Image (spheres, rainbow, N blue to C red):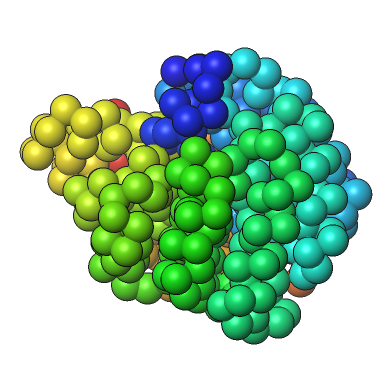
Amino acid sequence: MTSSTPDSSLHGVLPVLQTPFTEQDQLDFDVLSAEIDWAFSVGADGVVIAMVSELLRLSEQERRELASHVCKQTGNRGSCIISAGAESTKTAVELAQHAESQGATAIMAIPPVATRLGSAATREYFAAIASSISIPLIVQDASGYVGSAIDPTVYVQLLEQFGAERIYFKPEASPLGPNLSRIREVTRGTAKIFEGSGGINLVDCYRRGIHGTMPGTDLLDGIVALWQALEAGDENRIYELALPISAIVALQLSAGLDGFLAIEKHLLQRRGLFKNTIQRQPVAWTLDSETAAEVDRLFSRLQALL
């Protein structure tokens, strides 16, 4: 599962970690360590710090502390991907360089969310990050729930400038499947692409040739089993697992980013991994009892399949 080369280690199931907080709203590193250990115990190929890690609500110092801890706790068990996207190129570069210094396998970044950049400025932003590090950069379009969509020409230009071993892609603009295929075609099949739909589009995207998936940690055992079924071509098992996963993710998607945060933390607490479901405030949506009950019913069905 672990490899000495970035290209071969950046693959497969790479869950995005949820950030646990104490009752005093501090980062809970003990719980985070347990979350990372559990992820590898159920078959993760690596771990990721990204949007559902509540990065946009953390201070820059907290982001650095989080990156350091995750890199250290991961060790040589798999890849460690740290998101460094920021509102300024300067901050993004500094966060990327810090993560690399801590042992990150790769950097991921979204464009600034407060400013709608044109294609040229977007390309320059990502090029500055890539030029500042020696490890791969995963260019993330998170416009499905935050920020603006990235023009496919930006992907092509970055790929031409840095090569397929240095630039990877995680497109999340809707419709995901057709957009993924479009990137595949405009890059003549050279782009290495990850999907991050939480699992709801995993089957479709797998058939379009993705390099890996970045789901939440909450359904990780199910996603690992689904990935294995896809690799084995077991059609019955694929859809047996995909249906309850997709139903849960549909509920998460209906409430946007905060829907993912609330439901993922609910399930991590139900698993006994998290002590609480505290989110960094403010949030736009909280989990109501009826949604929680439906999530629990679907989760029980998924667990019965595993």
Q: Quadrant of residue 32?
A: top right
Residue 61, position in %: x, y? 90, 49
Q: Is residue 40 above or below residue 131?
A: above
Q: Residue at x 60, y 67 (%)?
A: 123
Left/right placement of residue 45 relative to residue 241 reads right
Q: Is residue 196 above or below residue 75?
A: below
Q: Is residue 70 above or below residue 54?
A: above
Pick the residue in front: 99 or 27.
99
Query: Quick check: can you spot residue 219?
Result: no
Residue 206, position in %: x, y? 26, 46
Q: Is residue 128 above or below residue 231?
A: below
Q: Quadrant of residue 16?
A: top right
Q: Residue at x 65, y 23 (%)?
A: 74
Query: Quick check: can you spot residue 99?
Result: yes
Pick the residue in front: 87 or 241.
87
Q: Quadrant of residue 184?
A: bottom left
